[in-house]
Image (cartoon, helix red, strand yellow):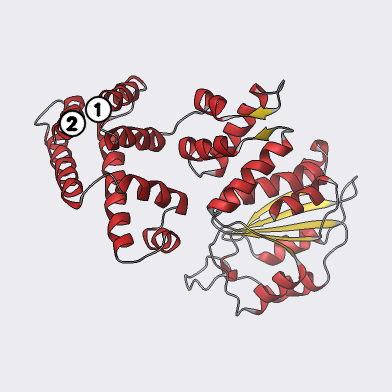
Amino acid sequence: MITEIWKSIENKQFSNLYLLYGNESFLINETKQKILHNGISEEELDFNFSLYDLEETPVETAIEDAETFPFMGERRIVVLQNPVFLTAEKKKEKVDHNIKKLEEYISSPAPYTILVITAPYEKLDERKKITKALKKNATVVEAKKLSEKELRTWVRERAAINRVQIDEEAIDLLLALAGTNLMMLTKELDKLSLFVSESNRIDSEVVERLTARSLEQNIFALVDKVVHRRIEEALRIYYDLLKQNEEPIKILSVLAGQFRLIYQVKELSRRGYGQQKIAGFLKVHPFRVKLAAGQAKHFTDEQLAYIIELLSQGDFDMKTGKQKKELIIEMFLFKLHGH
């Protein structure tokens, strides 16, 4: 797993070539920062670190830099961003790249340089000679969205880095409250770890008390109250969101998105799709599908159709100024209570 590569970097066991690709930008940035932090000192940044955007600069310019001896230090770090030529994309590039020069460098990299190629693309073109050469010679980090199982392992390992333990129930609650965004999870885990520095154990009570909820997670909790017909508690969450200066139109939009997801998950499950397949089809994280499937059990098709119709009407009323915006969501919740 990626944590093994991170351990090597932190122990100053570097590869001369790194290929970081995928659409989980947090993992790419974190790996890049670790290489920088451990590879050269802060004083050396000005003269032994270079960053090239390959949408603006020919790759051979970056390679020349990588082949230059470090100045008053033992190594250079050269980072190449946006290598569109590694993908199957056919778009016309602004610059012409001498890919041969890069291929030659990959086969015999400078021993005093760490060359990092960051490719924020879901897929690379595996048929290309350059992609094959990179995958063969570089240390490869595939920064893909983590599955629920990988997320749990990630949370445990991040807690361990902070020298704390986290209970399984606490992991459940953290994922439900903070969502599946790694940057958000890391921030929350670091905060929770600091708070429990005496006991070194994060339990669900601490998570409940301290975890910051995103708007999406607050809406999820609001929907959960609706699911269990606790409308007063749903209203309390709504009033809190207004106090936090959340726009009613945005709240309505996220509410509609959550109910649409519940409806789609219910329908696709009925057609025999598994959670993983639904997640791929709807382009959402499998953990969100799992939570929506739990909520879907509490609604009939008719109820969901009625709710989506109410939300659609609410959206129209908001945009046409028929009613005070804050009142529209309040009325929506009261109508649900009576239905």
Q: Is residue 333 left or right of residue 53?
A: left
| Residue 123 location, quadrant | bottom right
Q: Which residue is mark 2?
A: 337
Q: What residue is shown at x 56% (from left), y 60% (from top)? A: 55
Q: Is residue 103 left or right of residue 255?
A: right
| Residue that mark 1 sits on | 231
**Residue at 66% across, 45% down:** 30
Quadrant location of the N terminus in the rendered image: bottom right
Residue 317, how many percent across, how many down? 12, 36
Query: CB atoms at circles 2 and 1 under 8 Å apart?
Result: yes
Residue sitting at 27 percent across and 28 percent down? 230
Q: Nearer the viewer, residue 318 or 257?
A: 257
Q: Amino acid at mark 1?
A: Ile
Q: In screen coordinates, is 64 left or right of 112?
A: left
- The vertical placement of 21 against 313, above or below, is below
Which x, y percent locates residue 139? 75, 62
Residue 131 location, quadrant? bottom right
- Residue 9: give x, y in percent of width and height: 80, 49
Name the amino acid type tagged 2: His
